[in-house]
Image: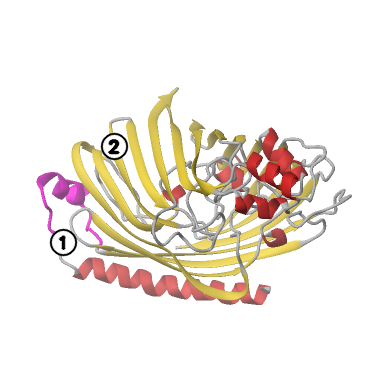
């Protein structure tokens, strides 16, 4: 995509913003208020003297240009990162919502995408761009990543304020409530969320910064799944549970049509205050049930039969489980400074199904608003990440095995993949940001023979 294309799409999204925002405002004025099923629902909708909107429209555009600097590259394989290459991605999304009945919202997100990640989104377990999917095209193409219904059932407690945003109406639900979501969406829309490191359109770019590296969440190659989740809010606690469809085979563009391959999820979150500063801590667990291979079985079969180890991996797949657990900390330190930290572990003897090649991961970082230098719409972030894999996965890769994203053909000298990322986001307008991002990777794809790697990125983002 050329700069001319980016500008053309930028004009398109601004024009769209003016049109659909006006439509949403007119609809809110002309539409009668939604009927309330009970007193608590009515109070949540009409408290604070606000007019309830029946329809909502938001949109966003994100363009990311990313490149690697030259680095030490004595050998490479099918899934290796290349020195001195660049790639770009572009996406344009509408977030269209409608209230169905009391407490119920329908959201649909039509999207246009274009581009690829570096080396076709290969070469690093901590892949450097969350704006890149595992698939891509040279020309713009249309997709529907989300189509879901959310139902809120108020129980008791004082009303809270939720601001209007993409896929979210302005709401005043009770503190104690149920929230049910069903349809097509991204599992991290609900699980493993963090205000400081979770959105590659606004904050960090690295996959293992925006989510726990071990969180092998259900998704097709674009990162979305079909399923349902329930959330129970009680005071400072929230309990979440969900079930989502896995791909038909690992890392596939197609979800399993029969829901035979699926993921079970649970999350417990506690919100707290430390020194009058808000924070939260969550523990997330998952269990993937699907046809997966034990890595040792693949290694043994390849050694015994002479079969290529990647073909052997497919041959030994059986229906089994791979589970993982992660911790997610979000802590405000000052009104302009926040901390995030994650740690996770998952089964190291089974092939990874959907996300990326990580068995243990730890990450932490800081996010600082520009208030101190009179740039309140600016943000600077810094993060450190350490990803590791099991000994048996190292052996599999050294025998020529390919992971979801990595595989240099051999791995004689493994080491932890260590990543530092920093970014500066300029608030050009209230609706537009320009970000410069830099990542430094030691032992890319766990290979101490290659690298270290410097990766540079420019991100242009607009939203309404």
Circle 2 Cα neighbour tier, 10 Å, few/some/many (<14 / 14–19 / ≥20): some
Disc 2 to disc 1, how far (Cα)? 26 Å
Name the residue beneath numbered marker 1: 33
- Position of residue 278 measured from the top left corner of the image (x, y, whole percent): 42, 31
Specify which label sits upstream in the sequence, 2 or 1.
1
Is residue 252 visible from the viewing direction of this image?
yes
Q: Nearer the viewer, residue 2 or 453?
A: 453
Q: Nearer the viewer, residue 336 or 321?
A: 321
Q: Is residue 43 above or below residue 120?
A: above
Q: Is residue 288 above or below residue 87?
A: above
Residue at (43, 43) in percent of width and height: 191
Residue at (60, 48) in percent of width and height: 316
- Position of residue 267 measured from the top left corner of the image (x, y, whole percent): 40, 36
Which picture quadrant has residue 268?
A: top left
- Position of residue 199 measured from the top left corner of the image (x, y, whole percent): 52, 50
Please tell me whether mark 1 sits on a helix, a strand or a loop. loop
Q: Nearer the viewer, residue 63 or 352?
A: 352
- Quadrant assignment for the C terminus: bottom left
Please say if the residues under marks 2 and 1 sit with CB atoms less than 8 Å apart: no
Name the residue beneath numbered marker 2: 233
């Amino acid at each position: 995509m050329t700069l001319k294309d980016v500008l053309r799409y930028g004009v398109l999204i601004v024009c769209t913003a003016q049109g659909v925002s006006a439509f949403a405002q007119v609809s809110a004025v002309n539409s009668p208020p939604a009927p309330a099923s009970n007193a608590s629902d009515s109070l949540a909708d009409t408290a604070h003297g606000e007019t309830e909107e029946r329809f909502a429209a938001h949109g966003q555009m994100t363009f990311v240009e990313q490149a690697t600097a030259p680095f030490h590259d004595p050998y490479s394989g099918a899934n290796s990162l290349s020195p001195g290459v660049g790639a770009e991605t572009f996406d344009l999304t509408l977030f269209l919502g409608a209230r169905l009945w009391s407490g119920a919202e329908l959201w649909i997100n039509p999207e246009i995408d274009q581009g690829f990640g570096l080396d076709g989104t290969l070469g690093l377990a901590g892949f450097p761009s969350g704006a890149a999917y595992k698939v891509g095209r040279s020309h713009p193409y249309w997709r529907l990543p989300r189509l879901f219904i959310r139902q809120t059932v108020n129980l008791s407690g004082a009303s809270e304020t939720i601001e209007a945003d993409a896929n979210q109406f302005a709401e005043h639900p009770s503190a104690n409530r149920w929230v049910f979501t069903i349809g097509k969406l991204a599992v991290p829309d609900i699980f493993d969320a963090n205000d400081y490191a979770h959105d590659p359109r606004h904050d960090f770019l690295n996959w293992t910064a925006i989510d726990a590296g071990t969180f092998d969440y259900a998704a097709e190659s674009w990162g979305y799944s079909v399923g349902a989740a329930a959330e129970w809010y009680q005071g400072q606690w929230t309990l979440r549970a969900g079930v989502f469809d896995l791909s038909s085979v690992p890392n596939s563009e197609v979800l399993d049509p029969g829901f035979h391959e699926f993921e079970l999820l649970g999350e417990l979150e506690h919100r707290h205050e430390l020194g009058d500063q808000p924070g939260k801590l969550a523990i997330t667990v998952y269990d993937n049930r699907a046809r997966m291979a034990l890595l040792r079985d693949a290694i043994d079969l390849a050694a015994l039969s002479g079969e290529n180890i990647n073909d052997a991996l497919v041959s030994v797949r059986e229906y089994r489980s791979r589970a993982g657990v992660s911790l997610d900390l979000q802590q405000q330190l000052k009104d302009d400074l926040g901390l995030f930290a994650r740690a996770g572990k998952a089964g190291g003897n089974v092939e990874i199904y959907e996300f990326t090649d990580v068995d243990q991961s730890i990450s932490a970082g800081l996010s600082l608003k520009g208030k101190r230098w009179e740039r309140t719409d600016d943000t600077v972030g810094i993060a450190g990440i350490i990803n590791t894999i099991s000994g048996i996965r190292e052996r599999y890769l050294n025998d020529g095995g390919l992971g979801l994203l990595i595989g240099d053909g051999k791995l004689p000298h493994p080491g932890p993949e260590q990543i530092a990322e920093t970014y500066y986001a300029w608030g050009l307008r209230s609706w537009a940001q320009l970000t410069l991002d830099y990542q430094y990777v030691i032992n890319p794809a766990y290979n101490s023979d290659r690298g270290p790697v410097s990766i540079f990125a420019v991100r242009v983002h607009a939203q309404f």
